[in-house]
Amino acid sequence: SPMRKKINRVSFNQDKTLFITSSSDFTAKLYDVVDLRHLKTYKTGSPVNDAVISETKDHILLGGGQEAMSVTTTSGKAGKFETRFFHLVYEEEFGTVKGHFGPINALAIDPKGRCYASGAEDGYIRLHHFDKSYLDMKDPVPEGPVDGEEDDTDDEEKEVDSDDESE
């Protein structure tokens, strides 16, 4: 499906078989490079400025937030200035990392999957080291709905722990 608002960034995975778009329409979309087929959509409640594909897990990291001009009177939570973690296959958000006071414009993940960096309009680049629980985390094989079925369960969102370093 065509995007309704501007695409802010396009990022490839390391072996250039997939790319992901980040859009002001509050989505990131995953595509196959060979046939340009749309594979998955990751939905958020605010503009997506950057998205990266993990090389070591089936995870997508998204960053963004409201435009700076519309944020002046809102708190960090209201502005949604956090990195959002999605399962690549199941399109489910499973965690967030807070830490910025302005929209996140850039993300990069370590090819070995041990840490990631985020850069935001607050003027900071943050280096986030994943903790052991994230590194050891096994992605669950979902019980329940198969493609096309409705899911009635409410999964609680959990915080992804990281040790932050600001530069």
Image (tube, rainbow, N blue to C red):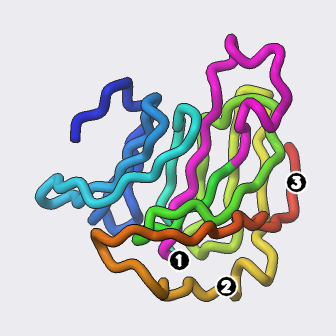
Magenta residues (range) = 57-82
Q: Label 2: which residue?
A: 137
| 165 displayed left or right of 40 | right
Q: Label 3: which residue?
A: 165
Residue type beneath disc 1: Lys
| Coordinates of residue 119 in the picture (x, y in percent) | 69, 39
- Residue lying farthest top? 69
| Coordinates of residue 117 in the picture (x, y in percent) | 69, 52
| 70 displayed left or right of 123 | left
Q: CA distance from mark 2 to mark 1?
A: 9 Å
Q: Earlier in the sequence, mark 1 or mark 3?
A: 1
Residue type beneath disc 2: Met
Q: Secondary structure at mark 2?
A: loop
Q: CA distance from mark 3 to mark 2?
A: 22 Å
Which quadrant: the N terminus? top left
163 or 70: nearer the eye? 70
Q: Earlier in the sequence, mark 3 or mark 2?
A: 2
